[in-house]
Image (tube, rainbow, N blue to C red):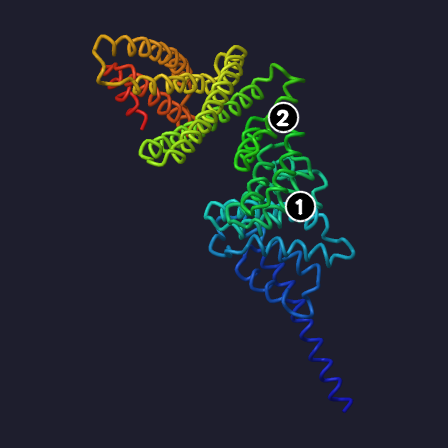
Amino acid sequence: MKRLLLAGFAILSLQAFAQKSNVESAAIYLRNGELEDAKKSIETAIVNDETKMDAKAWYYYVAILDTIYRNPAYEKLVDTDLAEKFFDGCKKCIEFDAKKRYEFYCKDQAILNSAFMCFNKGIAAYENKEFQKSIKYYQMVLDVIPYDKNEDLKKNNLSEKNIYLYMAYAAIQSNDNKNAKVYLQKLMDLNYDDHLIYMQMVNIHLEEQDTTTALSVMDNARIKYPTEKDLINQELNIYLSMGRQDILLDKLNGALENNPDDITLLYVRGSVFDNFSNDAAKKAKHTRDTVSTIKRKASSEKVAAKKTALLASAANYQKIADEQFKSSKDYSAKAEVDYLNVVKLNPDYIDAYYNLGALTNNKTTELVEKMNAIPSNLPMTEYDKKYNPLKKQKDEILTTALGYFKQALEIAEAKSEDTADKKKEKYSYMRDILYSMQQVYANLGDEKMTMETKKKRDLYE
């Protein structure tokens, strides 16, 4: 029995020796440039129970992979998951190196190199739309940051903030709202200075129909970026969808008390007034249609009491319509004042000029209705007497609107198109402005300019 035990002990010792020999063989192969044999030997050693926790084995494993990765001559030995293996090898080398013999390499150099490798793999995965895989690689980069005592990663734009930003983008692209919120919140906690992360967070909560949290995030964003146009517009859209522009208007009025010449705030308030005006005009038109419907019913009603009731109802609705139309004009006047102040403070504010053109053009609606209401069976002299003054007013208003559109066009034409995004923006402005001008020329009866403007607009399609 003792002899059997001794024999068993001898076998175990030989196995251990064999694995340690694999480590030594890998080291020799590495020194001799025989990387294929070195890789085979060390891969055998790191999975064996006798050497899988040996810091020396992991040291050589990392060194061999590092050499393979950096030398094009060994390209055929590069595994598709080399970056992960290299990262894992560095971590194991550090973990098992109790005596810190290999710290100079694994902890101070190699693991930083693994971060760059993983980052590049993350970018490649993102570009291939493998968003979850890219997040995995970015997480490895984050895991390396604590080892970066000289901030070499940060110096190469691989800071914690930037990596979380990449992770957030990847999560958003993969519709992974749960993790996107985690990464965006981390960026906020790290005080990442970009209003877009707040906008993304708001959008996610709105997608999840959590308006309360979305507005809470928006409140924090507006405190941090009080004059950021994108955030103001996003907040406007939220309150618009809720039918609560009144809340935003109160906020804008309060902000303008402290900053009366803030161009962005003035423009947004003008937009709110503009929206109020359009909304009131739509309601007024609907109410007037109701009046017409009731009057038609009254005209055919034979029962006197019912006829009287219908006419009274029509009168009440007419009163409401008049109030709504007056409200529309009042809001339009307020919007016009704000837009004019904007272009006074910034003569190149294209959106304000465009909105002034649209707002002015809309003033002709009431005049057109009056012109259309003139009985066509009147004698020509009497018809012209009623029609011509209205047409003159209409044309004067359209000419003013055209002037605003021309100023917007001049600014748009001067815009740069040296990048794809700038060109896209410029063309969008050109199409919208030229279409509006085309409509104005048509309403003025200027067929020649209508066609010329259309041809010019076609160039930007």
> Is 2 on the left or on the right of 273, as rendered?
right
**Residue 333 locus on image (x, y percent):** 50, 16
Q: Secondary structure at mark 1?
A: helix
The tag on residue 240 is none
- Horizontal side of 279 relative to 432 (left or right) equals right
Q: Is residue 180 left or right of residue 284?
A: right
Q: Nearer the viewer, mark 2 or mark 1?
A: 2
* Amino acid type, label 1: Gln
Between residue 231 and residue 365, name the one nearer to us: 365
Residue at 64% in and 30% down = 222
Residue 92 location, quadrant: bottom right
* Count of labels in the image: 2
**Placement of the N terminus among the 4 image quadrants:** bottom right
Residue reaching furthest to the bottom: 1
The single residue placed furthest to the front in the displayed view is 304
Judge whether 125 appears above or below 34 on screen: above
Location of the C terminus by quadrant is: top left
Residue highlighted by disc 2 = 250
What's under tag 2, amino acid-wise? Asp
Q: Looking at the picture, how far across and down is residue 97, in whole percent?
A: 74, 57
For label 1, the residue is 109
Q: Secondary structure at mark 2?
A: helix
Q: Position of residue 14 (x, y in %)?
A: 68, 75
Q: Position of residue 290 (x, y in %)?
A: 40, 32
Q: Residues within 10 Å of mark 1 (few under 14, many from 20)?
A: some
* Left or right side of 438 for 7: right
Q: Nearer the viewer, residue 209 or 414?
A: 209
Examine the rendered structure and indicate whether residue 267 appears above or below residue 183: above
348 and 297: which is toward the camera = 297
Which residue is pictured at 51% across the width and 20% down the height? 331
